[in-house]
Amino acid sequence: MLNPQPIPSYLIQSEAVRERFDRLKSREVILEVRDLDKRFESAQGECTALNGINFKTHRREFVCVIGPSGCGKSTLIRILAGLERQTSGSVLLDGKPVEGPGADRGMVFQGYTLFPWLTVKKNVMFGLKMNGHSTMHAERDALQWLDLVGLTKFANAYPHQLSGGMKQRVAIARALANRPRILLMDEPFGALDAQTRAKMQTHLLDIWRNIDVTVLFITHDLDEAIFLADRILVLKANPGEVQELIEVPVPRPRDYSQATSPEFLATKARLEALIHPPTAVDEEDDVVRPHMVRMTDVTDNVE
Ligand SMILES: Nc1ncnc2c1ncn2[C@@H]1O[C@H](COP(=O)(O)OP(=O)(O)OP(=O)(O)O)[C@@H](O)[C@H]1O
Ligand SMILES: [Mg+2]
């Protein structure tokens, strides 16, 4: 029998990948999160959603954030967006503290957040007009962004006429139209079927490659994180803390054939070990397994 090849360490990088990371880290810092804490008061008492979060993101870097449910991913992105206030610590964008929402950050959420009463084009124009652009300017820009996401033909359609993937492409166009410094994405493809999701991932990388934008992308999906990210910020829950910031050793450009490469498998094994450590899964099983009562009179067993 053939012995399977042992998986190498995720810390081993080819020379090309190492050089790429050296170049990436020499670029200016766009986002800096310093000693960020967030506590919520609730009827059940105080909950520490985020505890001592520190990291930096460089210009045109693609960072994915991953971690178990409730580890504070959405809380983090809402603080970065200025929609939520931290308890302590700071968030600096281009060296300036984030004090509230701003056009320098674009948001894309999992839920479809387009205005249903506006056409696709008018959805994209909306933010541009809010930021003081004339209708003519907004329309010209909106059409350019729709072209970039491949939806020119649907400019005059309404959101309900679009598939889930198309709606998220409009949401991306709308978020990018204001030329943000950073695109903040909270599980944007989480509601899509596997095939559409894979297409959207490739599409997002194509867009990112062609424009000057830094991306912070939250996901539950380990493969998605490895496929997209330069670095993966791994959080743990209770309290939400950084476990590790992993440099993905998979070379770019990326394609799905790399999913079986040693670098990809090594990164996935590391993420699995961090996110689903065997003891934690056992403990969780004890907690969530319901007390089973037989609720049928049928005597033959189904298995
Ligand atoms: N407004 C709030 N009030 C009280 N507690 C909150 C509030 N928002 C979030 N929390 C708590 O903070 C913690 C982190 O929540 P958050 O939604 O950021 O997690 P998440 O990592 O995005 O989870 P998921 O993967 O399920 O989306 C959870 O324990 C949650 O119950
Ligand atoms: Mg969330």
Image (spheres, rainbow, N blue to C red):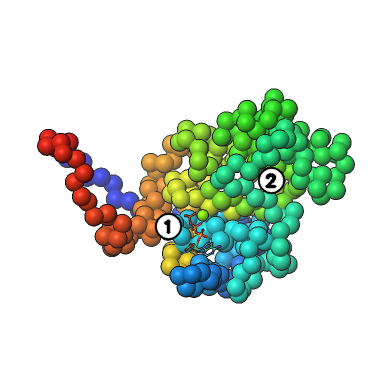
Q: Pinpoint residue 72: horizontal percent, then vertical percent.
A: 51, 62
Pick whichever of labels 2 and 1 is earlier in the sequence. 1
Q: Residue 267 at what x, y percent from top left? A: 41, 52
Crowding at mark 2 (Cα within 10 Å: few <14, some 14-19, many 20+): many
257 or 199, which lies in front? Answer: 199
Q: Is residue 152 above or below residue 17?
A: above
Q: Is mark 1 within 8 Å of ligand 1?
A: yes
Residue 212 drawn at (x, y percent): 70, 48
83 in relation to 45, above or below: above
Question: Does the image show residue 281?
Answer: no
Q: Residue shown at 43%/49% (left/top)?
A: 222
Q: Residue at x 71, y 66 (%)?
A: 99
Q: Which mark is residue 165?
A: none
Label 1: how many residues lie within 10 Å, few (<14), some (14-19) or many (20+)?
some
* Residue on which the image places disc 2: 175
Residue placed at 43% from the left, 64% from the top?
237
Q: Which residue is mark 1?
A: 68
Q: Quadrant of the C terminus?
A: top left
- Is residue 19 placed above or below 114 in the rendered structure? below
Q: Amino acid at mark 2?
A: Ala
Furthest-top residue in this view:
153
Q: SS for tag 2?
A: helix
Left or right: where 3 falls relative to 19:
left
Name which residue type carries label 1.
Pro
Q: Residue furthest left?
A: 299
Pointers 2 and 1 in contact (C-beta within 8 Å): no
Q: Residue at x 80, y 48 (%)?
A: 130
